[in-house]
Amino acid sequence: MQKQSSAVTTDSSSAVQQMLTRTILRYREQKSHPSDDQILVEFPLVITLNAIPIATLECTPGNEVALALGFCITEQLISTTEQVRLLHHKSSPEEAEVALSIKGGKERVYQILQHKGVRVSSSCYGSGAHGASTRFPDVGNDFSLSPSQVHSLQKESEACQALFSSTGATHFCALYDKNLSLIAYSEDVGRHNALDKSIGQTMQSGCIGDIRLILLSSRVSHEMLRKSAAVNAQVIAGFSAVTSSAIHLAEQTNRTLLGFVRNGRMNIYSHSERLGLSSPSPQMLPETASVNYVL
């Protein structure tokens, strides 16, 4: 597969600390004592596209350009083949800002937002908003894996949680290609941010078309499935619960959805054939009335 390229290829590390040390009071067995604790830092990231502010995300410092790219891709503001320029990236302890540019100027961005059913104003577009018409790329059937491989990757990805090991406050997202090679990994205070950061990393490295498996430490809601469906992921696996609308969207878009992936167990909600397992009689869930998918 030919690698895709983007003008945005670097993402300098944030100058802002990801963790702070704070003296707290620990209470154990009816006794208290002071102790130092590692606290995860959270700050706002302002994303602009062609000089139009489109989102302010509360996130963990680091990989802000990748997060901005991933957000724009998963919210379908830009395509995975778009040529994107980084105008500037600045970060302070108070906030960070990433300014991106695509062809077409402000008018192009206004048209994109209006097509998505978003009211355009001076305020930000915001995370997770989506209009009445959402298109998803066709997903192939060139990928499969066994349940034991899923659990092996679960253990591998959990072992990478450096921030979680120190703070207990992050989610992670791991992306794998069809050879089960890890191609992107991110931790963040927000599960959506972790997913967007990882997808943004693959945009920067030119391997966004290679994504086949998305492994999430969180639950899989409709929003997480919708973001995952913006790329060619065929299997989405979460360590916690899934929602009914996530199952419905997975069924609609030919994606395998797994939940409660833990300690040799998992629930398989759609397209179990990718795991070499037979499916029960299909039972489509009622679609959420407020969302209309265009496939």
Image (cartoon, grey):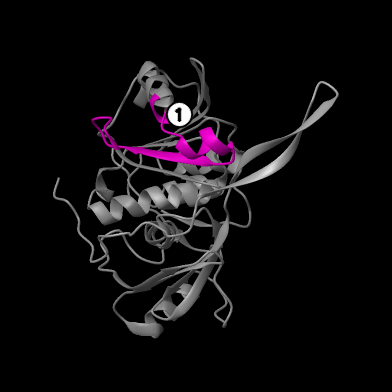
Exactly how many numbered labels are in the figure? 1
Residue 118 point in image, percent of width and height: 55, 72
Residue 171 point in image, percent of width and height: 53, 40
Q: Visible in this render: residue 22? A: yes
Horizontal side, residue 40 vs residue 160: left or right: right
Query: Is residue 76 in the magenta section?
Result: no
Horizontal side, residue 10 vs residue 224: left or right: left
Q: Amino acid at mark 1?
A: Glu
Between 116 and 164, the one lying in front of the other is 164
Q: Residue at x 35, y 49 (%)?
A: 231
Q: Visible in this render: residue 218? A: no
Residue extending farthest to the left is 2
Q: Which residue is mark 1?
A: 158
Residue 61 point in image, percent of width and height: 48, 55
Where does the magenta region start and end? 156-182
Residue 91 point in image, percent of width and height: 45, 66
Residue extending farthest to the front is 34
**Quarter occupied by residue 215:** top left
Horizontal side, residue 152 vs residue 284: left or right: left
Horizontal side, residue 54 vs residue 21: left or right: left
Quadrant occupied by the N terminus: top left
Vertical placement of residue 254 versus 293, above or below: above
